[in-house]
Image: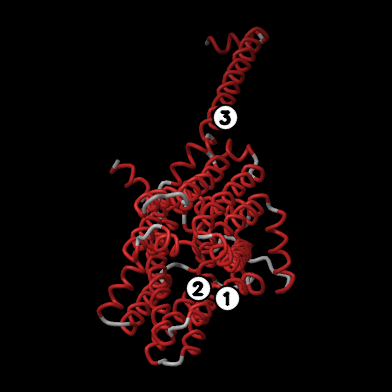
C-alpha cells in the first residue's frame, strides 16, 4: 500500500515545475479557506447581522462569475505566471490592510478584491498546470492538485478557528497574507514558458469571449461539465444551506456535531480526489464520472433519513468521496476538450456558470429549508444528483471509456501484431527474392563468386 501511495506522488518527483505549483496551490488554498472563516467571524462580530454575512458571501463568489463572463480570455492572453503572482500579491495586500479596517462596508469591499484575485488565480493555475507534466502523469497530477485543495479545505478552517480563539482576527489575517506571499514566491520560480505550450489565440477581447463560450458549447467534454456539473450545483446548494439546521434542529448534534459532519465531508473529498486517477484507469471516464455522481446521490439522499449525526457524517463522507472524484473528472474533461491556448477562458466560463448557479440555488435552497425542512432539502438534493448522473451517462460517449481504460493494452498489442506481421511478410519476400536471384544469376557471376 505504501508503494502505491508513493507511486501516486511520483509526478511531484518527476516534474519540478509541478511540485512548485503544487505547494503554491497548497499555501494559496489554505489561505483562501482560512480567510473565509476569519472574514465571516469578523463581519458577524462587528455587525451581528445575517445580511452583512450574506453580502460577504456574495462578494466572495460574485467576482468569479463576472470574471468568467467578461474577462476569461485574459487568462489565455496574459502570462499565466504573472497573473498568478499578481493575484497572490493582491490577496496578500488585502489581508495586510484588513487589520486596520473597522467599517464593515470596507471589509466587504476588500473581500470582493480578494475574490477578484482568486477568480484569476484558479483558472490560470488549472489552465497552465497540464503543461508542467508529461502526458503519462497528467491524470495523477490532476488528482494530486485536487487533493491538496481539499486538504486545505479541511485544514484552513481548523487553523483559522485556533488562531481566532487565541489571537483574534488580526493574527489570522497576517498569517493569511503570509500564505499568499509564499505562494507568489513559489510560482515565481516556475519558468513562464512552462505554463503555456501554445501561443494564445486572440482576435480581440469580445471575439475571444465569444470563441470561449462557443468552445464550451461545441466541445462534448466541456459541454458535459457545463450541463452535468451545473445540475449538481443545484443539489450542492441545497446540501450546504440545509447542513446547519439538519444537524442542530433535526439531529440535535449541536456545534460539535456540526464540526464532525463538516470534517467528515472534508475527509471524503480528500479520499475521492486522491484515488480518482487509479479508479479512472480501471473504470474509464464515463463510468467514473457517472458513478461519482451516483455515489453523491445515494450518500446525501440516504443521509436525509439519518437517525443520528454519526450516521449522517458517515454517509456524507461516502457522498463526498464521489464529489472528490467528480472534481478530478471535471478537470480532465476540460483538458481533453480545450486546447492549451483556450483552456483558461474555458475554465473561467465553467467556473463562473457553476458559481452563478450555486448562488441562485442557495436562495432557492433557503426557501426549501424554510418550507419543507432540512431533511427534505437533502432528499431533493439526492434526486438532483441522480439526474446529474443520467446527464453524465448521456453526454459522455461510451468510446471515451475505451480510450481511458485500456488504451495502452489494446492499441499497443494491436501495433505489435501489425509490426510482427509486417516483419514476417518482409522476411518472406526477401527469401523469395534471394531464391529468385540465385536461379537467374549468369554463369560468369557464379564462376567469379566461386573463385
- 342 or 400: nearer the viewer: 400
- 73 or 244: nearer the viewer: 244
From the image, tell me which residue sits under label 2.
Answer: 118
Q: Position of residue 128 (x, y in %)?
A: 52, 63
Q: Quadrant of residue 77?
A: bottom right
Q: Position of residue 394 (x, y in %)?
A: 66, 43
Residue at 41 percent of width and 74 percent of height: 184
> Can residue 10 be seen here?
no
From the image, tell me which residue sits under label 1.
Answer: 63
Q: Position of residue 396 (x, y in %)?
A: 63, 44
Q: Is residue 348 above or below residue 322?
A: below
Q: Quadrant of residue 145?
A: bottom left
Q: For numbered disc 2, what is the local secondary structure?
A: helix
Q: For numbered disc 3, what is the local secondary structure?
A: helix
- Label 1 or label 3, whichever lies nearer to me, is 1
Residue at 43 percent of width and 42 percent of height: 278
Residue extending farthest left:
166
Q: Is residue 404 above or below residue 91?
A: above
Pointers 1 and 2 in contact (CB under 8 A)?
yes
- Earlier residue among tags 1 and 2: 1
- Label 1 or label 2, whichever lies nearer to me, is 1
Relative horizontal placement of residue 287, taking residue 38 as reference (left or right): right
Q: Is residue 112 above or below residue 153?
A: below
> Can residue 74 be seen here?
yes
Pointers 2 and 3 in contact (CB under 8 A)?
no
Mark identifier at residue 415: 3
Mark 1 vs mark 3, CA separation in Å: 50 Å
Amino acid at each position: 500500500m505504501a508503494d502505491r501511495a508513493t507511486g501516486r506522488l511520483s509526478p511531484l518527483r518527476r516534474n519540478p515545475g509541478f511540485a512548485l505549483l503544487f505547494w503554491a496551490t497548497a499555501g494559496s488554498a489554505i489561505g483562501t479557506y482560512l480567510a473565509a472563516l476569519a472574514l465571516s467571524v469578523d463581519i458577524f462580530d462587528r455587525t451581528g447581522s445575517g445580511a452583512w454575512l450574506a453580502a460577504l458571501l456574495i462578494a466572495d463568489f460574485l467576482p468569479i462569475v463576472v470574471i468568467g463572463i467578461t474577462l476569461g480570455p485574459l487568462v489565455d492572453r496574459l502570462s499565466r505566471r504573472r497573473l498568478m503572482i499578481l493575484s497572490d500579491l493582491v490577496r496578500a495586500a488585502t489581508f495586510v490592510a484588513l487589520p486596520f479596517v473597522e467599517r464593515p462596508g470596507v471589509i466587504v469591499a476588500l473581500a470582493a478584491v480578494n475574490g477578484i484575485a482568486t477568480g484569476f488565480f484558479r483558472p490560470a493555475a488549472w489552465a497552465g498546470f497540464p503543461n508542467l507534466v508529461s502526458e503519462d502523469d497528467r491524470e495523477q497530477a490532476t488528482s494530486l492538485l485536487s487533493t491538496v485543495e481539499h486538504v486545505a479545505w479541511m485544514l484552513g478552517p481548523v487553523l483559522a478557528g485556533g488562531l481566532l480563539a487565541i489571537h483574534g482576527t488580526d493574527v489570522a489575517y497576517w498569517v493569511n497574507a503570509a500564505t499568499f506571499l509564499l505562494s507568489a514566491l513559489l510560482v515565481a520560480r516556475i519558468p513562464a514558458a512552462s505554463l503555456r505550450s501554445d501561443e494564445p489565440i486572440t482576435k480581440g477581447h469580445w471575439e475571444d469571449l465569444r470563441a470561449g463560450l462557443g468552445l464550451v458549447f461545441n466541445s462534448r467534454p466541456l459541454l458535459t461539465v457545463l450541463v452535468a456539473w451545473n445540475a449538481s450545483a443545484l443539489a450542492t446548494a441545497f446540501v450546504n444551506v440545509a447542513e446547519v439546521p439538519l444537524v442542530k434542529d433535526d439531529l440535535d448534534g449541536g456545534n460539535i456535531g456540526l464540526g464532525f459532519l463538516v470534517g467528515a465531508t472534508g475527509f471524503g473529498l480528500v479520499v475521492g480526489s486522491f484515488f480518482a486517477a487509479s479508479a479512472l484507469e480501471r473504470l474509464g471516464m464515463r463510468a467514473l464520472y457517472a458513478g461519482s455522481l451516483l455515489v453523491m446521490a445515494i450518500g446525501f439522499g440516504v443521509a436525509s433519513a439519518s437517525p443520528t449525526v454519526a450516521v449522517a457524517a458517515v454517509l456524507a463522507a461516502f457522498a463526498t468521496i464521489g464529489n472528490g472524484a467528480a472534481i478530478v473528472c471535471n478537470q480532465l474533461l476540460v483538458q481533453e476538450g480545450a486546447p492549451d491556448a483556450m483552456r483558461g477562458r474555458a475554465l473561467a466560463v465553467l467556473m463562473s456558470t457553476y458559481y452563478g448557479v450555486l448562488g441562485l440555488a442557495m436562495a432557492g435552497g433557503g426557501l426549501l429549508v424554510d418550507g419543507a425542512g432540512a431533511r427534505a432539502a437533502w432528499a431533493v438534493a439526492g434526486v438532483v444528483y441522480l439526474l446529474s448522473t443520467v446527464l453524465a451517462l448521456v453526454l459522455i460517449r461510451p468510446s471515451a471509456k475505451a480510450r481511458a481504460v485500456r488504451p495502452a493494452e489494446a492499441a499497443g498489442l494491436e501495433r505489435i501484431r501489425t509490426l510482427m506481421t509486417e516483419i514476417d511478410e518482409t522476411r518472406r519476400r526477401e527469401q523469395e527474392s534471394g531464391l529468385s536471384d540465385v536461379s537467374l544469376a549468369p554463369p560468369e557471376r557464379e564462376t567469379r563468386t566461386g573463385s
